[in-house]
Image: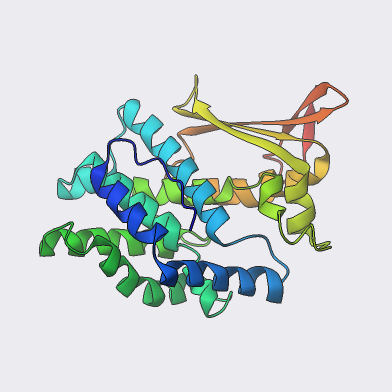
Amino acid sequence: MEFNIPADNNKKLEKIIERIRISPKMETLFRMCNVTAIDRLGFNDHGPTHVRITANSALRILRILISKGISPSCVENYGLSIDDAEIITVLGVIFHDIGHVVHRDSHEIVGLIVAQPLIKELIDGIYDESTEVIVLNEVLHIIYSHEPNVVPLTIEAGVAKVADALDMEKGRSRIPYTIGSTSIHAISAAAVDDVIIEEGTEKPIKIIIRMENPAGIFQAGELFLEKLETSTLKDLVEVDAVIVDDGHEKHVDITNKGKGKANH
């Protein structure tokens, strides 16, 4: 299974990613997530491509925050390493939607049950028993906290939550839109051309969302901002939304409950 996530010099993360890449079980579970989300409900991709994109975004955000002097919660609370924070964040992203193998409803709760033995398999032999318990439950915290109605208590969970919402480019609608879905999720995702994560000037993180028409405002204003507001990162992220029409750029205020008030 293709599973390109930038481990960089994190050897423990590299080992975990390789275990996922060669696992028929993980490949099947990801496919089942998409059967529920796309085939049965007509929603956007919740499978391996979504996971790869979200994991890459999460690592990008986490690494920028660390470079700005913001310490991950597992480092502050438990004395773990930056490498461990990356592993917790990536595993949280990998399993945040795994509950879809059973049902979309309450998938964050179901995911806590489904994910536990899988996480234990992936980190087996990497940590001692005490650290394994910490890593496992910090990952479960991310899974539980990724929906808008739950406020996460860790930096890692906030990073995963925001990264999840940032998979809003055309690629997010890659399957349902091409098979004719007219849901607002598919149409709005098809309108977003590019999402850029970079170091900010006013805040540590800057998110630039470029869209081809106002339909993308649903993704940016309703879905992304809702998760950003209920994350640990809401005061650390600045957002710039731009509609590009015939070469002209129009900056859009997406804070107006997704109604898209234009700033010329």
Quarter of the view holding residue 148: bottom right
Q: Residue furthest bottom?
A: 102
Report if residue 14 is visible in the image.
yes
Q: Residue at 79% of width from left, 23% of height from top?
A: 249
The coloring applied to the image is: rainbow
Residue 148 in view in this figure: no
- Does residue 254 appear left or right of residue 262 in this picture? left
Pick out the residue farthest to the top. 201
Q: Is residue 137 above or below residue 67?
A: below
Residue 109 lies, in percent from the top left, at: 44, 74
Residue 8 placed where, x, y %?
Answer: 33, 36
Please state if 234 lies on the left or on the right of 260 as rendered. Answer: left
x and y percent of residue 209 in the render?
66, 34
Residue pictured at 84% horizontal, 63% vertical: 180
Q: Is residue 198 above or below residue 12?
A: above
**Could you say which is closer to the camera, residue 211 or residue 31?**
31
Task: Name the residue: 66% across, 52% down.
Answer: 172
Dividing the picture into quarters, in which one does residue 19 lie? bottom left
Point 58% across, 45% down: residue: 166
**Horizontal and vertical percent position of residue 47:** 56, 62
Seen from the viewer's position, the closer of residues 223 and 98 is 98
Q: Quadrant of the C terminus?
A: top right
Q: How many numbered marks have been drawn onto this rendered protein structure?
A: 0
